[in-house]
Amino acid sequence: MKLFSKCLTAGMCLSALVAIPACSSDDWKDVDGATPQLTLSSAHEMTEAGRNIKIAGQVADNDGISTIDLVCKALNLNKRINLIEIYGEPQKTYDLDYSFKIQENETGDDFIIDVVITDIGGRQETQQVKVTMDGDFTAPVFTAAPDKEVTVILKPQTSLNLQFAVQDNRVVDYVTIDIQDITAGEDLPEQLAGFPRTVQGNGSATFNFSEKIELPSEEATLIATITAYDKAANEDAHSTSITSKISVGALPDFEKLYLCDVATAAELNSDVFGVPMLIDHVGKYKYRARYYNEKAGTEICFLAQKTDFGPVCFGPDNADPTTLGDDPNEVGRIRLNQAGVYYLIDIDTYNRTYTMSTYSVAQAIDPVMHMHYGQNDLNTWWGGWDNDDIWWQEFYFGPASGPDNVTRMVQDSKNPHIYVVEDWKLEGGEEMNFILHNWHSNGWWNFVTWRVDNASDPDKFMYYGNLHPDNSHYQGNADYFEFKYGDNPDFDINSWGDESYRKNFVPDNWVKPTVTTTGTYKFIFDAHLERARLVPQN
């Protein structure tokens, strides 16, 4: 310590760019007179704007390392690591490990960082780290793909139009497709003829595939595995796989059937949830759809899968429009010509029939329709329903991630059953976590609230809120419970206030889907249909 204090007092300048004259004191002597040694972990850092890079390596010098300078004017980097200040004396070895964030708005392509090591004798070693903005840190994403489970109806010649689309932040390099027949059991798989296959990309950030695949013309169970790779495919983080179970057989009684009101597969896959819309399964091969038709001329069909129009799409058969066909290439669409009404559609997939009727917005029922949205219609505390001196507060609701974080939904001016949130900005990869809940001045208060059937992929938003008695402000909501549960002999409206009883009808699931694509979205909730969709905002 005494030696270096004398040197610094004498005006020694520790500079990365100017050699430092050796202290003239006889107390200091060269050990080997050699320049410092630097072994970089990497001389090339591939990155992108807004990410951190790491400059790392091992430094050694027998005389003692004084400073390490990291300099790149173009990146606004001018960092000095003064080892004497840090440790009180020079170091003979040092593990360099420095993290630096590239600016979010950086537009350059290539940069050079000078790494300058200076020892106590003023000798320097300079090496360079090349920084390029072509890093790839994101695996490819399937923007369209077969559902996890797909049904193919047996035909004289059975086939599947296999379609999918992939997107990468840089380049989709190639995709592998493997289809195995596991009819005899998963321990005895057989490769479908022509598989596995590798399909090369075209140097683009997008990859689209559509091909008719011939399938066994007998009952079978197949497993399709599709894996997309980007240019850094040697790393696990740079490939994405999906698996689809394909059941080939006679027309099944589908557990779920969906109403589709969009025209393209891209629209089926660009939503976070809600497109297409689940309809009610009311009996064997029988389904009932309720749908609010905002504009005249809407065209709809019914799908047995959520991500594509095939392999099963029910619509008017081209050869006989009075019956329902199931081949997406041989059916048309049901046209809804009345605007501003609810359609009620009954479907029989076995007998291939459907019937339609309409009812007005005023005839539709929802659990909060008798309250006055945006007005003081929320009873702050229970009790005193018929008294005029109750502390009433504003009633509104919306997506809520916590008791103090309720986003106000806007009630539609033409259909008061519909509520909307616009300009909802979401990040790709973000896992959402919310319920629909009323705002309250004192935190959680289950005055009105909705839960979902499936947290990660919600189809139904079911009323989980309270039964409201009639009061001086509005009629209660007993008519909603009659509409929803009137045909259920096991339902007792007087027990609804017991949450454990309530969970027999509505699971306490929060909404927790994962957002695929960064963007601005629109959330639309229909309290009559108990359906919601979160879709890109045009």
Image (cartoon, grey):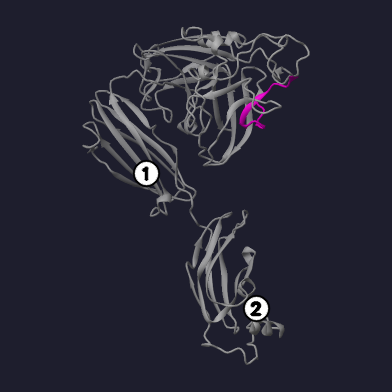
Q: Position of residue 348 (x, y in %)?
A: 38, 12
Q: Residue furthest front?
A: 2
Q: Amino acid at mark 1?
A: Thr
- Disc 2 designates what residue? 15
**Viewer-side residue, 153 vs 94:** 94
Residue 446 image position (x, y, % from top left): 62, 22
Residue at 62% of width from left, 32% of height from top?
A: 402
The amino acid beneath tag 2 is Ser
Separation of marks 1 and 2 at Cα, in angstroms: 53 Å
Residue 451 falls in which quadrant of the image? Answer: top right
The one nearer the camera, 214 or 277, is: 277
Q: Residue 230 in the image: x percent, y percent?
A: 42, 50
Foreground tag (1 vs 2): 2
In the rendered view, tell whether residue 385 sits above or below residue 220: above
Residue numbers of the magenta segment: 392-409
In this rendering, position of residue 374 left or right of residue 322: right
Q: Residue at x 62, y 90 (%)?
A: 27
Q: Quadrant of residue 404?
A: top right
Task: Check residue 227 in the rendering and tell me which mark sits there, or answer none.
Answer: 1
Q: Is residue 415 visible?
A: no
Residue at horizontal 62%, vertical 77%? 16
Which secondary structure, mark 1?
strand
Residue 258 at what x, y percent from top left?
44, 22
Label 1: few (<14), some (14–19) or many (≥20) C-alpha neighbours in 10 Å: some
Image position of 195 (left or right of 259)? left
Q: Is residue 385 above or below residue 444?
A: above
Q: Quadrant of residue 184?
A: top left
In magenta stretch: residue 404: yes
Sequence-earlier tag: 1 or 2: 2
From this view, report whether residue 38 is shown above or below residue 357.
below
